Image (cartoon, rainbow, N blue to C red):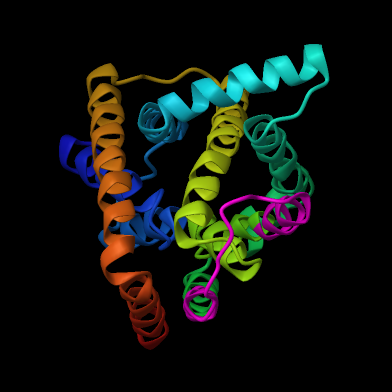
């Protein structure tokens, strides 16, 4: 890897991790189009940790409250909205964790093609558009996540293992389909990303540990972490503000156009 590849891939990870456009699709497609060498597991770890640090910092006050209420719900057996949300985030992570353990090898071998990415980009982009239209017709979208919502959103999040789906996209879509507001769907989707990114980073580290040691370019890894962290933080800020102005339509259009171009090419 050189510095240019590092900057481009870290920026792509930072920009696309929390936008509903699929970071995995872009990280598969760009190196293929540019004919770049594999960036390596070390790079995957640091850019994931970069995006994780960004979302934790953005929601730091909410996360602090979630942790405190979660702890007291265990020792006092008393429930609050925040403790329920904490449990919901943990339980909502179970389906994607199980699906990853069961189907990871199959997905790696069979679903990382450009054709699969193209179709999933279009299909789940249209589903995102439908859910956005549906919630716009709901005069009273909910701000409280129920247990049935957690089950549905968690199950839908497992589909994000398919390249081109977008983890944030499918969880926001699921939230809108069950009647949550755009704001709450986005917040729950982003908070739900914290254990998922953490688990995926642990998995990559385990893979890295099982491989023979290679030469690590620490300066490039530092650049990758920094670019991914900074770009993902400002992407979250931008995305949440943009939702109030234009909604999700620009991302739906982008996904459909990208999918059609991939099929055409």
Residue 35, how many percent across, how many down? 30, 57
Q: Find out whether residue 165 is within the magenta segment.
A: no
Residue 143, how many percent across, how many down? 56, 53
Can you tell which quarter of the image residue 142 is in?
bottom right
Q: How many marks?
A: 0
Q: Is residue 176 left or right of residue 37?
A: right
- Residue lying farthest to the bottom in this orientation: 264
Rendered residue at 78%/44% (across/down): 98
Span highlighted in magenta in the image? 127-156
Rendered residue at 48%/47% (across/down): 187
207 shown above or below 144: above
Can you tell which quarter of the image residue 233 is in?
top left
Residue 147, how many percent across, how many down? 77, 49
The quadrant of the picture occupied by the C terminus is: bottom left
Which of these two is toward me, 174 or 46? 174
Q: Is residue 107 left or right of residue 15?
A: right
Which of these two is toward me, 113 or 142? 142
Q: Find out whether residue 145 is within the magenta segment.
A: yes
Q: Is residue 260 left or right of residue 79?
A: left
Q: Please name the predominant secondary structure of the magenta segment in the image.
A: helix
Q: Is residue 10 left or right of residue 72?
A: left
- Residue lying farthest to the front in this orientation: 140
The quadrant of the picture occupied by the N terminus is: top left
Rendered residue at 53%/49% (across/down): 189
- Residue lying farthest to the right in this orientation: 77
Rendered residue at 71%/15% (across/down): 72
242 shown above or below 48: below
């Amino acid at each position: 890897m050189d510095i240019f590849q590092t900057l481009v891939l870290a920026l792509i990870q930072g920009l696309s991790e929390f936008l509903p456009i699929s970071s995995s699709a872009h990280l598969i497609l760009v190196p293929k189009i540019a004919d770049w060498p594999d960036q390596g597991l070390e790079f995957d770890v640091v850019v994931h940790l970069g995006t994780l640090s960004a979302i934790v910092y953005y929601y730091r006050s909410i996360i602090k409250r979630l942790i405190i209420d979660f702890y007291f719900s265990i020792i006092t057996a008393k429930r609050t909205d925040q403790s329920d949300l904490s449990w919901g985030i943990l339980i909502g992570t179970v389906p994607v964790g199980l699906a990853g353990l069961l189907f990871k090898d199959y997905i790696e071998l069979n679903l990382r093609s450009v054709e699969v990415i193209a179709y999933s980009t279009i299909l789940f982009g249209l589903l995102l558009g439908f859910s956005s239209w549906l919630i716009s017709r709901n005069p009273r979208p909910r701000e409280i996540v129920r247990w049935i919502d957690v089950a549905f959103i968690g199950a839908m999040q497992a589909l994000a293992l398919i390249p081109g789906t977008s983890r944030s996209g499918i969880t926001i879509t699921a939230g809108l389909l069950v009647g949550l507001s755009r704001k709450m769907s986005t917040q729950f989707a982003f908070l739900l990303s914290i254990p998922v990114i953490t688990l995926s980073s642990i998995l990559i580290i385990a893979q890295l540990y099982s491989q023979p040691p290679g030469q690590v370019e620490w300066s490039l890894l530092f650049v990758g972490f920094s670019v991914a962290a900074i770009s993902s933080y400002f992407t979250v800020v931008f995305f949440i503000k943009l939702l109030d102005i234009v909604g999700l339509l620009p991302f739906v259009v982008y996904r459909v156009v990208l999918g059609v171009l991939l099929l055409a090419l």
